[in-house]
Image (spheres, rainbow, N blue to C red):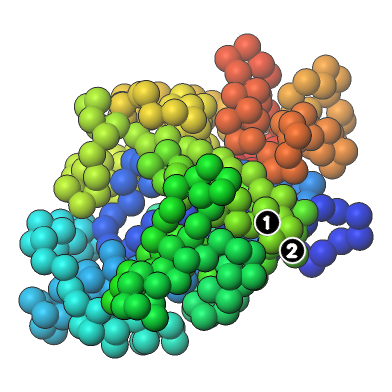
Amino acid sequence: MPAQAGGPAAGRPRVLLAPVTVTPTKPLTPSHLKFLLWIDVMYRATVPLADVILRCSHTTYHQTEQTLGFWEYLDRTRGDDDYAAMSEVDVGELYVAYRADGRRPTAEALRPYADAAEHGWVHPASVRVLRAWQTQYRILGMHDPGLLAHVPPGADLATVLDRLAELGVLVDLRAHGGPVHLDLTRFGQPLRQIIAADGRPNYLACALRELLPLAGDHDEIVLAHDPELDADYRLLSHVLEMAGATVRRYTIGRVPIDGVLSSARQGDWRGHDAATLLASLSTDHTPDAVRLGFRLYFIAVLGPGPEQSLREDLLRHCVARAERLCENSGGPAPGHGVEPAGPPGRSELIELLEQHRGRHLYIDPYRLTSHAFGRRRPAPARQLLSEAYL
């Protein structure tokens, strides 16, 4: 089920937070951690101000060749391996081997996997990865949007293509043995293939199946993605706006390793995956310190761009600082000079959060974190910590 913060309340805005998903084929990398922690704070900090749905369905995006091709490769080359006995790092090494293999599976080879995934089946290798992620989500205090849930998209591909045709943005060459394109050229945007000539949809086609049926149900849709997907998300945003949605795009830069932005397909997570980073810090610090410290580092220190490489010494420093902040928290919300006798009031939290809305309905995690945890500011109120960070 998609995660929702309670039922709709009269007068409260409705926000759909739709981040790009991480393909369950490898460990969580530093770039993944940064992205997921930003989304987690954005979601949890917006909940007090709006009815928020976090739509992050792996079911929808299992249909991409990146995932289906890996599953077909495993069955073709590994047979009946016991993936439950592997770690997510072991699965990641198999994924690196798959990408290095270079052979592109045929549509016929992938069709049984696509059909099974449409009805909720997930390959055991990806189940193993998703279960590992669930454990890491719990350690980090991140909201689980339904990593292992079967959440099918709201429309099938045929329905989406009909809707795109109604909007006048479809070039469908299937009758001539060709592909299907999204055509926004009259708006100055490039022609983009969404279905190959052999019938395989790409990520953008899957995103349209997921989000186009939801376009009119929310006051704001937030599309969160990394810079490498900027072109596709511009197209997606434009189509959703044509369908009546108010869309905000939010870009979160990746994390270089030693100054290099490489890819998970090349094993950029080796030695820096989530399990390794957590193991190096969890034994010496409290769970709250780890949760807050990771957010301070990946949000406030690294910032929105991709300029700063991973530095584990700074991450460790942030966790140590978080330990002190957690011990000293419990005072008024930042910006209030008088400490109340009891716990901070709900109105104080709302007032603080609303400062970081800007022109949009969602809370910007970088603005909130930088403000609340500035060096010369008092320790943040415990309510803010528990609502958005712990």
Is residue 230 visible to the viewer in this orientation of the structure? Answer: yes
At label 2, counting other C-alpha atoms closer than 10 Å, the crowd grade (few under 14, some 14-19, many 20 or more) is some
Q: Amino acid at mark 2?
A: Gly
* Residue at horizontal 31 percent and vertical 46 percent from the top: 29
Residue 288 is situated, as x and y percent measured from the top left of the image, at 52, 42
In the image, 222 versus 369, the foreground residue is: 222
Left or right, residue 132 beside residue 207: left
Q: Quadrant of the N terminus?
A: bottom right
Q: Which mark is residue 242?
A: 1
Is residue 43 visible to the viewer in this orientation of the structure? Answer: no
Q: Secondary structure at mark 1?
A: helix
Q: Which mark is residue 206?
A: none
Q: Amino acid at mark 1?
A: Met
Residue 140 is situated, as x and y percent measured from the top left of the image, at 47, 49
**Which residue in the structure is indicated by mark 2?**
216
Question: Image quarter for residue 108?
Answer: bottom left
Residue 268 is situated, as x and y percent measured from the top left of the image, at 21, 43
At label 1, counting other C-alpha atoms closer than 10 Å, the crowd grade (few under 14, some 14-19, many 20 or more) is few
Q: Secondary structure at mark 2?
A: loop
Q: Mark 2 and mark 1: span between their CA atoms? A: 10 Å
